């Protein structure tokens, strides 16, 4: 029981919810005892407004982000409070402020959250009317609340400075485990492989997001704290997790062929599937250990599963005969090699986690590590570059500004009790994309109605203020804890605690809440309609950009693999950066496809072709990673001229795909290029054989090198086929636009 409670409470979202609740409850509780409830309430409001800007990252960025938010929140309250009674000034000022704050989101996630709290501040200004000294006092209490929240946040940080990154790494281990588990599911004879691949692509989006969070935290700390041993351990865990994902991508098995090959030997593939599941479950155990902050005790379960596979391969060879089993054994050895590479990486993670790692490894410096951070450019030019209808942020900012202005005017003209609640609902619900706005609209309405029903049920039986106060604190924590992971549940608990608070301070609570529900419904309807009719950002309008970026990233990754195969030596930073970008862009492409699926059917243009493009692109990344992993992990010979001809043809095809996505012209390989490529395919193996024979090597070495050549050639042929299919799909998309 205690373990289950710990699981739900010892996480980042719950810790943030506790921070927010403490920052709000303490000022109200303390000052209410001294007869200053109103002042305590405003301080709590300042803390609550500041809370969303507390975005995880380096301590320096955390403090700067919160201080900027406090300054903007206080300044907004002061400025709008001063002019709100001047009708002819307040309308244009409101429009410009909302537009400016919304545009801040072009600077990344932290700026996006600061933008959000500023927009909330704009809407809440109209819930009260202060002038003169009263306005200055009100803004002073808002400022004090923000500073108090900063103090509480820093207190939490210094009490457990490493807990955030531990939980992030635990999540990364868990998601990677789930990804590998899905790969294991592919081995079931009745597996719906297209559905599993779609789930893997969706999971890639989550993995990319958590990779970015971890990079930001660990690399900034490595730069600013002289790279402590503890930070290095966590960097080692993280880099090995990235490599585990790359290895997983690099081994794309033809499951149909393998099932046909081993139909009469089902135990072979079943044993391998058990090994795959064991690898996934070990990562899950590592995740649970890190999350629970408990001692991890390594075991031999991975090596035992690997040994079982070795025994099964030997038995298969004995039953079938050495010559007849040769091809099957080669396939199985390839699968075994993949599992060994994964286990090696997991063992490194275990050593880093248990502190048994070689001290020399920890002393190594991470060269050019800061290059792996996603750069954040805060120059004014970034804002100016986005002031056009081609920018999704600009369209959203304009749409939100006009919707807020319409909501404000309607709140003034029609007999709404609290027009500011309409504005608040619009800000909370409205998102750049139609799909997410629609989803949040329904979830907000659902949460409001369900939370209202539950809260009134409690109020009917309970009038004791101490009990209601306790219940409101619990509901507040749960509301903020779930808001990031399950908005429907979060909205339900937020509604409950708001009603409990009104139940304690307002005698006519039923009437007040009725208006809140109406305001919520009206605000949600405005947000929904605005996203549909006011310069909507339909996903098909931006899809080409994601398609192109993903192809460019894959092309650059393949270029780095080709360079490495030709030059060998240590894996370069450029290679790792290209790999990172390829992973990120395939995730971004899938996220765009997911958003398109949430939009109206009439706006889901070329869905089948787009999905085919996504899958082909993911398979191409997998094949490129396979080639890269093989070249890194084997003592390969010098790349042949034929290899470079074919590799350059794949890169040329990808360049043609990029050109095809960018224009209406048709592109294809020249006749000369086609002739050279055909020659390379037909002669590739012969060329490689002649090159090796001229080196004067013995027969055994020749056989090994030819085996290498065969594996590389197979990947090249696959890459060419994939790139040609991508070119065909891109031309189809171009014709149907």
Image (cartoon, grey):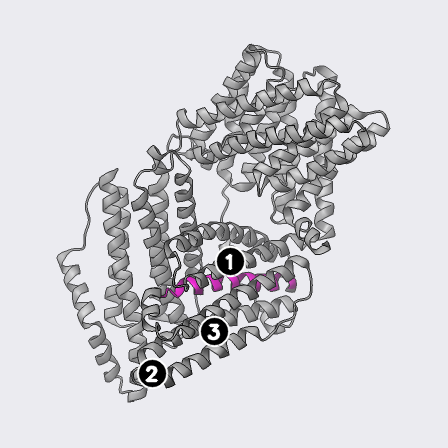
The answer to which of marks 1 and 3 sits earlier in the sequence is 1
- The image shows residue 508 at horizontal and vertical percentages of 72, 17
Identified at 50% across, 30% down, the residue is 430
Q: Which residue is mark 3?
A: 340
Which quarter of the figure is the C terminus placed in? top left
How far separated are the C-alphas under marks 1 and 3?
19 Å
Q: Residue 91's mark?
A: none
How far separated are the C-alphas under marks 3 and 2?
25 Å
The answer to which of marks 3 and 2 sits earlier in the sequence is 2
Bounds of the magenta span? 230-253
Q: Visible in this render: residue 42? A: no
How far separated are the C-alphas under marks 1 and 2?
35 Å
Q: Which residue is mark 2?
A: 320
12 or 490: nearer the viewer: 490
Q: Residue 178's mark?
A: 1
* Pointers 1 and 3 in contact (C-beta within 8 Å): no
Above or below — where is 89 with respect to 616? above
Residue 50 is inside the magenta segment: no
Identified at 32% across, 72% down, the residue is 261
- The image shows residue 272 at horizontal and vertical percentages of 45, 71
Image quadrant assignment for residue 53 = top right
Above or below — where is 230 with respect to 61? below
Image quadrant assignment for residue 519 = top right
Image quadrant assignment for residue 355 = bottom right
The answer to which of marks 1 and 2 sits earlier in the sequence is 1
Circle 2 crowding by C-alpha within 10 Å: few under 14, some 14–19, many from 20: few
Please identify, in this view, whether the residue under mark 1 or under mark 3 is nearer the observer. 1
């Amino acid at each position: 029981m205690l373990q289950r409670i710990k699981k739900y409470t010892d996480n980042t979202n719950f810790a943030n919810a506790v921070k927010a609740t403490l920052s709000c409850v303490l000022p109200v509780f303390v000052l209410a005892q001294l007869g200053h409830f109103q002042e305590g309430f405003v301080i709590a409001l300042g803390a609550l407004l500041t809370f969303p800007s507390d975005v995880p990252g380096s301590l320096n960025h955390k403090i700067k982000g919160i201080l900027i938010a406090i300054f903007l929140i206080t300044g907004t309250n002061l400025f709008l409070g001063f002019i709100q009674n001047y009708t002819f000034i307040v309308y244009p000022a409101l429009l410009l402020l909302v537009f400016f704050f919304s545009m801040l989101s072009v600077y990344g996630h932290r700026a996006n959250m600061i933008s959000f709290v500023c927009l909330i501040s704009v809407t809440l200004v109209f819930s009260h009317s202060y002038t003169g000294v009263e306005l200055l006092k009100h803004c002073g209490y808002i400022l004090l609340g923000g500073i108090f929240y900063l103090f509480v946040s820093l207190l939490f940080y210094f009490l457990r400075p490493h807990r955030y990154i531990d939980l992030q790494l635990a999540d990364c281990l868990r998601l990677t485990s789930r990804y590998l588990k899905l790969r294991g599911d592919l081995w079931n004879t009745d597996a719906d492989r297209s559905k599993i691949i779609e789930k893997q692509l969706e999971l890639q989006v989550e993995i990319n997001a958590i990779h970015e969070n971890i990079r930001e935290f660990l690399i900034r700390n490595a730069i600013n704290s002289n790279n402590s041993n503890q930070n290095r351990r966590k960097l080692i865990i993280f880099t090995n997790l990235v490599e585990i994902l790359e290895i997983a991508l690099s081994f794309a098995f033809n499951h149909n062929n393998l099932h046909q090959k081993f139909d009469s030997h089902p135990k072979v593939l079943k044993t391998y599937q058990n090994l795959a599941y064991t690898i996934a479950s070990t990562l899950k155990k590592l995740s649970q250990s890190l999350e629970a902050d408990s001692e991890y005790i390594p075991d031999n379960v991975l090596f035992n599963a690997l040994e079982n596979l070795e025994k099964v391969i030997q038995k298969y060879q004995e039953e079938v005969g050495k010559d007849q089993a040769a091809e099957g054994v080669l396939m199985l050895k390839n699968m075994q090699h993949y599992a060994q590479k994964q286990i090696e990486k997991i063992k490194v993670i275990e050593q880093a986690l248990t502190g048994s790692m070689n001290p020399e490894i920890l002393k190594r410096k991470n060269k050019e590590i800061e290059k792996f951070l996603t750069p954040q450019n805060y120059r004014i030019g970034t804002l100016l570059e986005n002031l056009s209808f081609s920018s999704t942020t600009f369209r959203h900012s304009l749409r939100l500004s006009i919707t807020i202005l319409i909501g404000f005017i309607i709140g003034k003209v029609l007999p709404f009790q609290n027009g500011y609640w309409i504005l608040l609902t619009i800000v909370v619900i409205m998102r750049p994309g139609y799909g997410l706005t629609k989803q949040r609209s329904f979830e907000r309405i659902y949460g409001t109605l369900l939370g209202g029903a539950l809260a009134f049920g409690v109020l009917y039986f309970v009038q004791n203020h101490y009990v209601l106060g306790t219940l409101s604190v619990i509901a507040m924590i749960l509301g903020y804890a779930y808001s990031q992971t399950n908005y429907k549940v979060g909205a339900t608990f937020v509604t409950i605690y708001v009603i409990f608070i009104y139940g304690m301070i307002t005698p006519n609570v039923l009437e007040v809440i009725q208006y809140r529900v109406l305001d919520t419904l009206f605000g949600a309807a405005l947000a929904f309609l605005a996203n549909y009719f006011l310069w909507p950002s339909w996903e098909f309008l931006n899809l080409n950009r994601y398609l192109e970026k993903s192809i460019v990233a894959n092309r650059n990754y393949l270029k780095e693999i080709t360079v490495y195969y030709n030059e060998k030596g240590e894996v370069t930073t450029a290679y790792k950066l290209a790999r990172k970008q390829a992973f990120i862009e395939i995730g971004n492409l899938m996220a765009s496809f997911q958003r398109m699926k949430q939009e109206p059917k009439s706006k889901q243009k070329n869905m089948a072709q787009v999905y085919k493009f996504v899958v082909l692109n993911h398979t191409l990344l997998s094949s490129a990673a396979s080639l890269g992993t093989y070249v890194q992990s084997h003592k390969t010979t010098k790349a042949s001229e034929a290899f470079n001809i074919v590799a350059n043809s794949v890169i040329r095809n990808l360049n043609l795909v990029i050109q095809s996505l960018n224009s209406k012209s048709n592109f294809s390989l020249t006749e000369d290029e086609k002739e050279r490529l055909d020659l390379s395919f037909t002669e590739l193996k012969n060329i490689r054989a002649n090159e090796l024979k001229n080196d004067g090597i013995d027969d055994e070495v020749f056989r090994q090198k030819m085996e290498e050549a065969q594996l590389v050639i197979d990947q090249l042929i696959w890459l060419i086929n994939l790139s040609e299919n991508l070119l065909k799909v891109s031309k189809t998309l171009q014709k149907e636009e």
